Amino acid sequence: KLDALEKRLKQTSIDDSDDDEDLIEKEKRLERERLAKLGKERAERERIEAEKMAELRAREEEENRQLLLLTQKREEGKKRRLEQEKANLEARTRDDLRCPIVVIMGHVDTGKTKLLDKIRKTNVQEGEAGGITQQIGATYFEKKTLLTQTEKLNETEKFNLTLPGMLVIDTPGHESFTNLRSRGSSLCDVAILVVDLMHGLEQQTIESLTMLRKRGTPFVVALNKIDRCYDWKTCKDTPIRDALKVQSEGTVQEFRSRADSAKLQLQEQGVNSNIYWEMGDEDWTNSDFVPLVPTSAVTGEGVQDILLLLCQIAQRKLWRQLMWCANLQATVLEVKAIDGLGMTVDVLVVNGYLREGDKAVFCTLDGPVVTEIRGLLT
């Protein structure tokens, strides 16, 4: 029995050692399988990562290529545009002038809008709130209108009018509209400074005068309300010299006295001036000399004179800056919403063309606004 027990114990110990060996091998095999699986997963991850990096590099190279192409196109477009602009500037001639932009400035209630009404034969001033202009308004006069208005005076002057027309901008004279007056004076070629002959230079007149001199804008002084002189005999819509010929000596003396007072006040502001028909050749060639034109916005005396004088100044002195050019030059006057049309922009086109469908970029407080011109309203 003892031998049989010993034999059985020996057999059990041998079997146990075999099981241990099998477990170790199994652990080793499982470890090898785990490591192999990890290796495959890592290789897969590296492959996916490599594909992503290759894709990113390809995308970046494509973006760089597109950016380079865009930059090249922009440079080519800029070069073509500069060449076209240069060609347009060289193509300008004295025979092809654009419309001069004229701004009417002066103190409130000196008769600026009334003077403009007299030229275009309308009555805008009475329809304004309190008879006071509160916005910038632009009026275009065709060449035939200018010829008709200056016909009587031009019989003696014999001036060959070649301008295609004239654009007149009316600015507010009230003290609270300084910004609008500044806008108006900054975009004009020549100005009319309206002075009340009865009151002389007033606060906003001096302010307007300062703006014009600061920008170097040539201007004409309209001595308005000459019909207020005592015993003035109305000569409707006639040249001022013809109107003065029929006045009594006392009326002419009063006019002379008030005109001399205005000249003195202008001299105090550093402006040399004289009645325009009394100016000599030296005065005309001297850019510091300002012509004075007596006018009446109510009865129309002197309106022909001021129109013809503006045309003469434009053709003789300002022809270099008035030569028409195809390069677009425009200024935004006002942005407003109109029922049925939506947001509209009042634009003053100085040179070039604006067409429906053109892309336009406007500067706003919220950044640039890119839009398409849907319609042109004139």
Image (spheres, rainbow, N blue to C red):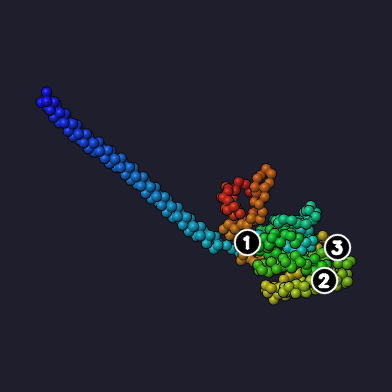
Q: Residue at x 12, y 28 (%)?
A: 6
Q: Residue at x 78, y 53 (%)?
A: 129
Count the numbered circles shown: 3
Looking at the image, tell me whether mark 3 or mark 2 is earlier in sequence order.
Answer: 3
Q: Residue at x 53, y 60 (%)?
A: 85
According to the picture, the residue beneath numbered tag 1 turns out to be 97
According to the picture, the residue beneath numbered tag 3 turns out to be 234
Nearest to viewer (mark 3 / mark 2): 2
**Which of 4/164 is in front?**
4
* Residue 151, placed above or below residue 276: above
* Residue 11, placed above or below residue 100: above
Circle 1: residue type: Leu
- How crowded is the residue under tag 1: few (<14 C-alpha within 10 Å), some, or many (20+)? many
Q: Residue at x 80, y 66 (%)?
A: 196
Q: Percent from the top left, x then y, of residue 173?
A: 75, 61
Q: Quadrant of residue 186?
A: bottom right
Q: Which mark is residue 258?
A: 2
Q: Do we see residue 188 in this rendering?
A: no
* Residue 7, placed above or below residue 293: above
* Tag 3 and tag 1, C-beta contact below 8 Å: no
Circle 2: residue type: Arg
Q: Quadrant of residue 364?
A: bottom right
